[in-house]
Structure formats: C-alpha cells, structure tokens
Amino acid sequence: MTAVPPTVPAVLTRAELGEPGEALAGESGESVGIHRLTGPLAGNGLLFKQYKRTAAQNGRDAALEQLIAFGRSPAAVGRTERELLLGCTSWPVAKVTDRNGELVGCLIPEADRRFRAENGRLREIDTLAQSDERLAARGVPVTAAQRAAVCRGLVRVAAALERRRLVYSDWNYANALWCPADCSVFVIDIDGCRPERMPNIFQSDWEDPLTDGAMPADVFTDRYRVALLTARCLTGHRDLPSVLHALDSARDDAVPGRSVLLDMLWAAARETRPASRSLLAALDGADVHFPVERLPLPEPRTQPPRRTAPKVLASDLTVLPDDAPAEDPEDPEDPTDNDPSASPATTDDVTATAWAVGIVVAVLVALLIVLLARNG
Amino acid sequence: MTVPRRPHESDRYVLKPKCLPTYLVIDASSSMAPHQTVLNETLAHVHASIQDHPRVSEFAHVSLIVFSTQAHLVIEMANLEDVPVMPEVRCNGLTDYGSAFDLLRSRIDTDVEELNGLGMAVLRPVVFLLTDGLPTDEDWEASFQRLADHGWRRHPHVITYGFGEADRDVLRRITTVVGFIADQGTDHRSALMEALGSMLSSLVASSEQGRVVFNKSVPGYQAVEPTQDLLSVPREYLE
C-alpha cells in the first residue's frame, strides 16, 4: 500500500509547491498537465496534476475532497478497499488550491518504476490487449495465466470502486499500467471518480451501447467498460465483434470468466449486467452463471485476406482504380457523411443494379447467339 | 483542437473500427541532405512511439511518402505495428511538390478503398507535410487544387510544417487546416523534432477522440492560416 506521506497536508496552495518541475504528461481531459515537484515536497514520489479552470466549476472539488478523505481515513470501514485502491491506483493525496481557495489541481502518487518498459515509457495495458503472436514478436511473450492474473488485478480495482459506490467512467487502454514480471496493475486518472454517477466521458471505441450519450455514467456503464477492457486483454482481440465471438466460442477453461463477461457486455438490459465482484469471482475460478438475457451477437467482422506485411517500397505510382468507391470518408462539415457506415446501402444498391444489368445483357447475348445459330 | 462533428444517432454505436488514413509526406530534396540523420532518427522515434501505443496504430494507419525530383511511396498504408523498422530516407534532388500531390491523390483512392474492404469505418484522410524549401516545379498549384478539390469527396485535411527556406505564402496555399512556419533562426533539428512530435501528439489525441485532432500551436513555429477556398474545415474551428 502506498502510504500518504505524513508531512503532506490534505490541502495545499499552489505557492507551497514551488515551480512546476519536469512535465510528465500534457493536456488531457480536465488536466492541463502532470509535473514533478521541485519545492519542499520534491522527491517523495508525488506528482502535481494541474486542472483546467472548468474542473472547479463542475463539482470536482467536493468529489476530490471525499476521495482524499477516504484515502486518509483510519476507519475500519472500507479498509480492505482503501488498502487496495491506495496500492493499485494513483489515488489523490492532497488537493491544491490557488490563494483564493479555488481548486487548481491535486497531488497524486507516481507509478512505480516496474510499470515502465526498458525504454522508460509507461507500459500501458494497451500493449497487453494484443494477440499472443504480436506480443511475442515484440519480445513480450505472455501466457494465458499471465493475462488472467493482470485482469484479476484490474477487476479488483473495479470491484473496490463499485463497493465504495464510486463511478470511474474512464476505463480504457491508456488508464491502466501493467507489469509483466509480477502481473500487477496500476490504474491512473482515478482522481476523476465521483459517487454514484458522473458525466459520461466520451471515449471512442469504449462507448456503452446501452448508455445514451446524454445520460450520466453510472455503475452499469463502468461494468460494461471494465468488462470490455478485461475481455480485450484476455482474448487479445480488440474490435468488439471479434471480442464477443472469441468469448462465445472459447472453452471455459481457456478464457476464465467468459460467460460473465458476455453478460456484462451483451446483456439486453444494462441493469442486468453482473457486478464486477462477480466477474472477479469468475476470474478466480468460481463457476458463476446468471440468468441474463443477452442480445444476439453481431455479425463477425469479415476480413478479406490481407498481405502479411505492408510493402516498403522505393515506389511507383499506383493506377487509380476505376470502379466506384465502396464508401466515402467522414466529412466533419457534412453530418450525412459523419457516419462512415451510412453509405453501404447505396453501395449495395449500385452492386445489385450492376448484377441485374449484367444478367439481362447475358440473357440477350445468349438469345442473339441462338437466333444467329438458327439463321446460320 | 478537435474537428467537431454534429451529433448523429448512429455515432453512438458503430461496430466497425474507425480508421484514419494518415499520410506523412516528407521533403527529401538535397537541401535536407545535411539533416538526413536527424530526419531518420526522428522517424524511427515516431515509429517506436506509435508501436508502443497499439490503440494509435490501429486507428491511424500510416503511409510514408517522400518527394524530391519525384515522389516515392516508401511505406504503403499500414498499421505501423506491421512495419518492423522504418526504412532510411535518403535526401537529394529537387523539390517537386506537384508529383507529391499527384501521388497522394492516387494513393488516397487506393487506400480508402482497401481500408473499406477491410471492414473499417474510414475517416477523411489527414496529410502531414514537412518541407524545408520552395517548390521547383511549375504546376504544383494545379496538382494541389486537384488534391484539395471539395468536389472530390475524399479530399484530405492537410497540415503543413515549413522550415529552412520554406515560404509562408506557399505554405498557406498547400494547407487546408493549419500550417506552421518555423521561427527565424530555428535549426533543422529542432524544427524536425517539433514537427514530428506535433504530428505524433495529434495522432495520439485523435485515436482517443476517434476523430481528427490537431495542434493549434507548435513550439518554435508560427501558425499559418490556409487560403480561404482551401479550408477543409469551417473557419470557426480554427479560431
């Protein structure tokens, strides 16, 4: 467990931190950046995460205070979750304000060195959600047991948050780090958690199909997203149809928790998604099944055979294809183009028409040949 | 900055993975020869960084085009994870912009077609063009007009970086989103590193947002507004 340094008060002013040190991250979400400390608190493993002005205006202040108080509480209630969250996440340690008491940021613990790759970069869980072959090619071979162990770590964090009725909303490839040596995980950006519900953070490729964009994120959104991250890490597949079909066709012993994952991802009603602690139990080997009605699986993604590696050329101009485009790219100016999947119907129509014309022509040609033959 | 989209019901849930065809177009004329090593080191860094972020490489498929007396397709449109190492770029020859724009236009048609065939939801392509000089051909502007023609539905977003002898006025005529001209006295090394760093940060942010995200400012550079009729996004998005 990462102990809160005893000398760090729960609230500090920006001036008390001194000049910001080395920048470790740039602008992202509600954060302006993350810096090392240079002042009297330098060297204690804490970082300064600076917020945009909007953070103070949208209720983050009170939520952050609650998180910090929970992390510092000596109470027996919640001790198990507290120890887990302090050890496995960048749980906020202190609030930072300006001279007027306005929220400007917070102090968070830096991820341990073991979460960095040999090149010094943080090892995001993004790098685990790949096929065995690709991981081996990159020099990081991973076994199924290792995948399962890392996922248990992730889901433990999710279950602890859920138990404390906290919503994270931000499960994705970038917000969890992992260590191949001991299969531990470290979840970051945790200071944005809110009790019960919070604004739904838009994340391309992580959108909950049953949570409308205008709805706040809640525990059911979190269950979907943590299940998606877990399933991607377990199966090595990334696009949703492939993930679902990999889970559906796998043996129980090959992908632990696959049935619960399918329930969490593909339940017909969001409220019937099983809890994260149930997924944890399943990952731990429990034979857990729920009477959850699931939606029909989407069609598997059809992928035409592709060359194994792109060509690296010295190059030649490629002749323009003369057939009609299958689809057109997204155009931010034209909402009708915004959905790149909007045009296949037109394409299908064009294709069907072409076939029909072809058949009519073929029949006419055949008739002509027969007539000519008879006349001949 | 994000290129915004209007809400669309089907945006909420699309099973096709989105893909941003990304073209890195580099001036490899003889004036770049003294900086060839820096260029190759920086390209290798970009390659390694993208490989460390599979979510970026699966979203932004990348093609590398270099141009001098002619334009050359160096890397076909690919998930960079499938490219083991970046090839080395050699710099010599003239600065033929027109051949680069012509090659780009033909490649975009080919690549969009192929990505669609792979079941991807293909976004409007984005071009990051780096140049350190002035065009030596005469018809480059006509070639660019064909590339940026709004009547062609695949016309790309073009973001440019100019340094060395690059000219602000030329830059604004080959840009459709935002251009950057290096401050006077900026050396090639820093200019190249900042430009490719800016491209990298755009791609990382774009992969998170699922749409094109670009920087409004780059250290050591001044922003250049494109000519009005070339804009591939409404002007208010640039303000």
Image (cartoon, coloured by chain):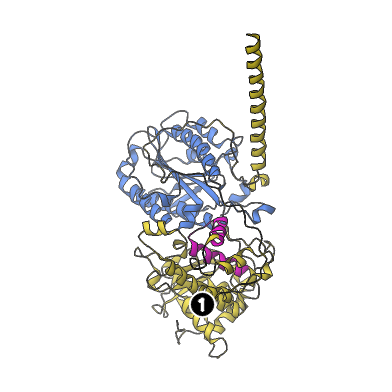
Residue A224 drawn in magenta: yes
- Where residue A209 sits in the image (x, y, percent)? 65, 60
Q: Which residue is pictured at 45% across the width and 65% down the height?
A: A124
Q: Is residue A141 above or below residue A2?
A: above
Tell me the element at label 1: loop
| Residue at image mark 1 | A91
The residue segment tinted magenta is A221-248
Q: Which residue is pictured at 56% across the width and 68% down the height?
A: A226
Q: Which chain is blue?
A: B
Picture quadrant of residue B33 = top left
- Look at chain A in the picture and name its colour: yellow
Q: Is residue B77 above or below residue A162?
A: above
- Where residue B105 sits in the image (x, y, percent)? 51, 35
Residue type beneath disc 1: Trp
- Where residue B117 sits in the image (x, y, percent)? 54, 42
Q: Is residue A209 above or below residue A149?
A: above
Residue B16 visible in the snapshot: yes
Q: Give the mark count.
A: 1
In this rendering, would B151 be left or right of B206?
right
Residue A321 drawn in magenta: no
The furthest residue to the top:
A376
Nearer to me, A135 or A39? A135
